Structure formats: C-alpha cells, structure tokens
Amino acid sequence: MKKRLFSIIFLISIFLMFTTIIALADMNWRQFEGVEIRLLMNKHPFTTFIEPKLPEFEEKTGIKVIMEVFPEDQFRDKRLIELNAGGKVDGYMIMPGQAKLHYWKAGWLAPLEGYMTNPDLTEIKEWDLGDFFAGPMKGARIEGHQVGVVINAEASLLSYRKDLFERFNVKVPETMEELEEAAKFFHKKVVDGKEMIGITLRGKKAAATSQFVDFLYSFGGSWTDEEGNANIASPESIEAFKFYGKLLREYGPKGAPMYHWSESTSTFMDGTAAMIFDANVFKSLYENPKESKVVGKVGYTTIPAGPGGKLPHVSNWSLAVSGIATPECQKATWLFIQWATSKENVLGTFLSGVPAGRESSWNDPAFVSTDKTPDWTKGSLDSFAIGQPQWNPPVLNVSEIRDIVGQVIVDSIEGKDVADSAKKAAGLMNKKMEK
C-alpha cells in the first residue's frame, strides 16, 4: 500500500514538474518561420519608427514582412479596395473610430483576444496587456471582441498662451462659461501691437466634428440615443452646437468655416490666438522653434467642464489582423503586432513623438527626465483616464454622417437657426443610417 502511494505521489510530482516546465517555457517566436506576411500601413510617425526595425523582427522570427506604406488618403483607399477584392492583406493599420464597424461587418477584422491569452502565441507577462490604456483599447473593441492593439493614444487639449494669461491675470478656464469669458477678454485685445483672436477652433464642416464631439458630450449630448437614432437635435446637443458656433463667430478668426487643423494651428503658432482646442499631438508643432512663435509660452489643460461634465474623446491608430488572411498568416501577423507593440518599441515611438498607448512609457525615466511640458503630460493622461472612445458617429457611413453634422456646425458659426438646422440634419442622418 505504501509502495503504491509512493508511486502515485511520484507520478503526481513528475506531472506537476512537467506542467511547470511547460508553463515557464518561452514562447516559440520561430514557429512560423518561412511564412510571408503583407502589411498595409499609413504614413505615420509610428511607421517611420518601426519600418527600419523590421530586420530585427525577421531575424527573431524567420517571418518575411512585406510592408507597404502610403499617405493617409491613398492608404485608406488602397486598404478598402484590396480587402474588398479579397487580396493578400494579412494586417494593417486602422483608426477604429473611423472604420471598425464597417470592417467588422465585412469580416475584415480578426478577433485578437484568443491570441492575447494564448501562451503559445503570446509572452503574456512580458507583453502585459494591462499596461495599455483602457480607453483607447476599448475604442478598438466591438461586440465584445478586441480587433486592434493601439499604437498611439490621442485626445484633444485646451492649449493657451500661458504668458498672456499670467500677464493679464486671467484664470485658466475650468468650465465652459470661463472659456467664453477668457475668449471674450482676449478677442480684439491689442497685445504688443497685435490684435488678438480669443480662440481658434476647427470650423470646416466634417473636419470640425472630431473636435466638436468633446463639446457635444460635455454638454450632455451625443451622436445617437440608446435606440441608435440620431440624437444631434436633443436640447443638450443643440446647446453644444450653439456654444461652439458662438465661440468661433464672436471670438474666433475670420473665415472660420474654412478652418481645418492646419489653418487653426497655424493661427495659434503665429501668436495671433490666445487659445486653441485641438489634438494633443500638435504640441510638437507649437513647441517647434523652426515654425512656431509661441515656443515655451504655451500651457495645456483638459477640456473645460460643461453641463454634462468633462468628457473628452480618446482616439487611436491600431494594428489589426486581417479577417481574410489564412490562419497561419493571421498568427504570424499577430506575432508582428505583439513585437511592434512591446514595451520597448512603444517607448521608442513615444520618445520619437508618438503619444504612447502604454502607461509605462509615460512613467519611464527616459521620458520623465526630459519632459519639458508636464502640464501637457498631465492633461493628456487625465483625458485618457476620463475620455470616451466614440469620437465618430457609430455608423457604417461615417463620412456622410460627419458631413451632415458638420453643416450644423457651419450654420451655427454663421448665426443661422441652429435648432432648425439640427432637426433637419437629424432627419437626414436617420435616413442615411438606414442604408
């Protein structure tokens, strides 16, 4: 009996030791050696950083990577045409808020959660899924499936002339009322021989919607209601339209309905505007001594709170696995995504100017020791923590709906009947969403 018991204990010990060895074994990075994958990429700072490092990945895995890079408009067209035609596309960059619903319904996005939790395909502890910001990762999720891994995290901030706010003892806006007061104070004020603009914002139709959305949600509005119908004519949404339009009409630049991000940032960088609300990535422009007259004079903070609170958006570019690729190429592409979004590579892209989607990058001594704009860092992190990912209308035909909503913004800037414009736009939006 004792002998038999000893044998059982011995066998259990061997089994536990064997399973422990398996659990501790390194993932085999060369399990798809000889496979070739084709990736379609947007011309983006992340791509600029990672493309020269491809030989490292190929040496590590034995996987051959064909990476094709295109300017953004051409990239979007190329990606759509090739996926629709069923060509060899194994992975690609995607802005989930722009295209995930369309691509998911078309079967062009592969779910990733099965890869992320599989120790045969992922170095789970080292890759550290929990290190990614929850908001941006949620934005790359649909119907309970993770369809992308973020490569950058973006929010919009209120950037202001710190030197002028201090000089004239103006309070940095914490509410929408204070934002209007500050814009009114500076507008047409002559400072050092130059007439100031109170605030500059995007006003050009569809382009304006990506910034207006923060005002929409902060006023308590939204793109759609719980039933999926247009909500842009709700009382809260109408107030957001009115406020945004008033800022540009009364305290903004001339010709505001033609202002895209380029015109708006140029106005701020020229020292003409006291404030700007736009993407946090534009800090690199404001602080560029070769192009900007406001270097070292800019302060950064989150969007001021509205009646609905403070609800900035968080957006991102992500890497996705193609839903039409072969199973072998899908897994090989996942290895590329895992490698490209490692802590080491994400930190590298962050130090080269790409706002990181990993929390550890923002806390890394290599960044902290060289951070010259800690208020920008705090504003960005605070926005990531409280932001909502639905910066675009949650519809298949995003571009059409943005044009419809953008027209309401233009009508508001021009002083037209906003309630009537929003009501008509909501009706048109509902018809377009039925397609």
Image (cartoon, rainbow, N blue to C red):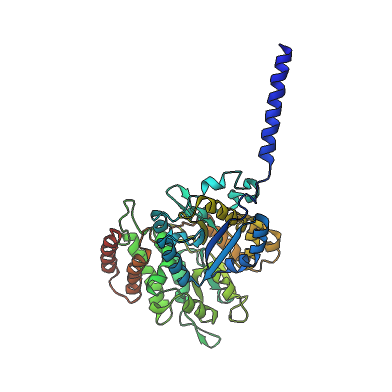
Q: Residue furthest bottom?
A: 193
Where's residue 21, x and y in %? 70, 37
Where's residue 28, x and y in %? 65, 47
Residue shown at 63% from the left, 80% from the top: 289
Residue shown at 39% from the left, 82% from the top: 255
Q: Residue furthest top?
A: 1
Do we see residue 186 in this rendering?
Answer: no
Residue shown at 37% from the left, 73% from the top: 205
Q: In the depicted view, which residue is nearer to us: 117 or 236?
A: 117
Check the picture and name the quadrant holding the N terminus.
top right
What number of labels is visible?
0
* Up/down of 298 relative to 17, above or below: below
Where's residue 242, x and y in %? 35, 68
Q: In the depicted view, which residue is nearer to us: 176 or 294?
A: 294
* Up/down of 176 relative to 258, above or below: above
Q: In the depicted view, which residue is nearer to us: 236 or 167?
A: 236
Residue shown at 68% from the left, 29% from the top: 15
The image quarter in which residue 378 lies:
bottom right
Apparent side of residue 219 relative to residue 27 in the rendered image (left or right): left
Check the picture and name the quadrant holding the C terminus.
bottom left
